[in-house]
Image: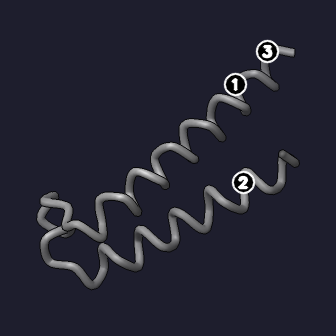
């Protein structure tokens, strides 16, 4: 997986999750809806992967 691809997927997941939350009262109240929960989970997984990769690169 190219490095830029991970960052692009991470940023797209952030954008998608943020856009959903802006329009969803349940998600705004920290009570994720059936649509918002998987969007946020994808964002969180990609964020973790990106941060882990950044940490590994700093150790080199």
Number of other residues with Cα within 10 Å of mark 3, as a class: few under 14, some 14 to 19, many 20 or more:
few
Occupied quadrant, residue 53: top right
Q: Distance between the residues labelled 1 and 3?
A: 6 Å
The residue labelled by disc 3 is 59
Q: Which residue lies furthest to the front in this view?
A: 34
Question: Residue visible at 62% across and 37% down?
Answer: 49
Decide: is 22 above or below 54. Answer: below
Q: Residue furthest bottom?
A: 23
Q: Distance between the residues labelled 1 and 2?
A: 14 Å
Front-lying residue, 38 or 57: 38
The residue labelled by disc 2 is 7
Q: Are marks 1 and 2 in contact (CB under 8 Å)?
A: no
Occupied quadrant, residue 26: bottom left
Residue 32 placement (x, y as % from top left): 20, 61
Front-lying residue, 45 or 21: 45
Task: Check disc 3 and report its element: helix, strand or loop.
Answer: helix
Decide: is 9 above or below 23. Answer: above
Q: Are marks 2 and 3 in contact (CB under 8 Å)?
A: no
Task: Check disc 1 and report its element: helix, strand or loop.
Answer: helix
Residue 21 placement (x, y as % from top left): 30, 73
Residue 43 placement (x, y as % from top left): 48, 54
Q: Which of marks 1 and 2 is nearer the N terminus?
A: 2
Q: Quadrant of the C terminus?
A: top right
Q: Earlier in the sequence, mark 2 or mark 3?
A: 2
Question: Residue visible at 87% across and 48% down?
Answer: 2
Question: Residue visible at 75% across and 21% down?
Answer: 56
Front-lying residue, 26 or 34: 34
Could you tell whether 2 is left or right of 21 in the image?
right
The residue labelled by disc 1 is 55
Q: How far apart are marks 2 and 3 (CA)?
A: 19 Å
Could you tell whether 32 is left or right of 19 in the image?
left
């Amino acid at each position: 997986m190219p490095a830029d691809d991970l960052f692009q997927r991470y940023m797209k997941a952030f954008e998608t999750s943020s856009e959903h939350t802006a329009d969803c009262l349940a998600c705004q109240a920290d009570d994720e809806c059936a649509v918002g929960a998987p969007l946020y989970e994808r964002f969180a997984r990609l964020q973790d992967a990106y941060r882990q990769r950044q940490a590994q690169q700093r150790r080199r």
